[in-house]
């Protein structure tokens, strides 16, 4: 049986569909289950304005790291703080790990914004931030599983002017396996496991 790709984004989309996702700014009316089904089917999705802002901010950070950041950019000062945190790390590092849950061969996959000295760093661009915003996110549990040598995961959040840090250590990070198991149980219960296996199988 082919290995089935599994990402934090897919798990996050599923959890959002079930109970609402506190990690996104609620600025538009959304249909969480329709969004999850589009993700499950791997339908092409347009880049939203919020997503584009995040991409633009992260690109600015990268440009500053390599010495070509635009100082006239309104986000430059905040991006420069983030750049100082990620400078010297591996940027856009792709990680994968074969795992098996409930007899299903999976390939856990993630793209890290930065891996630096045992610290996984993820850059978030958000209009608002409250401390502990990402405590129940699946992202740090997935990435801790992917990077066995990592001892810490740090979310660096910016709204373009302020910068916040939210860190989780390995010993306080829950295992991602129970979430994966619940995900597979749910897919079976609603007769979507075959669709998942078809759309997410690895070549």
Image (cartoon, rainbow, N blue to C red):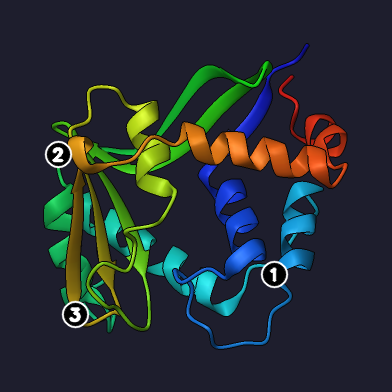
Verify CB contact (< 8 Å) between mark 1 and mark 3. no
Identify which residue is drawn at 75% across, 65% down: 33
Q: Which mark is residue 88?
A: 2
Direction from residue 25 to residue 150 in the image, left or right? left
Which label number is shown at residue 62? none
Report how far apart the C-alphas of labels 2 and 3 lie in the structure. 22 Å
At which x and y percent is residue 120?
Answer: 26, 41
User: Is residue 139 toward the left or the right of residue 2 in the image?
Assistant: left
> In percent of the image, x 86 and y 32: which residue is there?
194
Question: Between disc 2 and disc 3, whose residue precedes?
Answer: 2
Image mark for residue 162:
3
Of tags 1 and 3, the one toward the viewer is: 1
Q: Nearer the viewer, residue 199 or 138?
A: 138
Residue of label 1: 32
> Which residue is at a point 50% across and 36% down the rendered structure image?
178
Residue 7 image position (x, y, % from top left): 56, 40
């Amino acid at each position: 049986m082919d290995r089935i790709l599994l990402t934090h984004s897919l798990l996050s989309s599923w959890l959002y569909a079930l109970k609402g996702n506190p990690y996104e700014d609620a600025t538009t009316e959304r249909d969480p289950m329709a969004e999850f089904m589009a993700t499950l089917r791997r339908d092409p999705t347009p880049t939203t304005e919020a997503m584009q802002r995040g991409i633009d901010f992260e690109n600015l950070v990268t440009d500053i790291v390599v010495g070509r950041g635009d100082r006239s950019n309104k986000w430059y000062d905040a991006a420069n703080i983030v750049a100082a945190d990620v400078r010297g790390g591996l940027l856009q590092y792709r990680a994968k790990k074969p795992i098996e849950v409930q007899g299903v061969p999976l390939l856990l996959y993630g793209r890290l914004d930065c891996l630096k000295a045992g610290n996984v760093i993820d850059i978030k661009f958000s209009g608002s931030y409250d401390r502990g915003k990402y405590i129940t996110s699946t992202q740090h549990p997935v990435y801790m599983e992917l990077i066995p040598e990592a001892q810490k995961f740090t979310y660096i959040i910016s709204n373009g002017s302020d910068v916040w840090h939210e860190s989780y250590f390995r010993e306080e990070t829950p295992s991602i396996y129970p979430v994966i198991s619940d995900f597979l149980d749910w897919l079976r219960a609603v007769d979507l496991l075959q669709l998942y296996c078809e759309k997410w199988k690895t070549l």
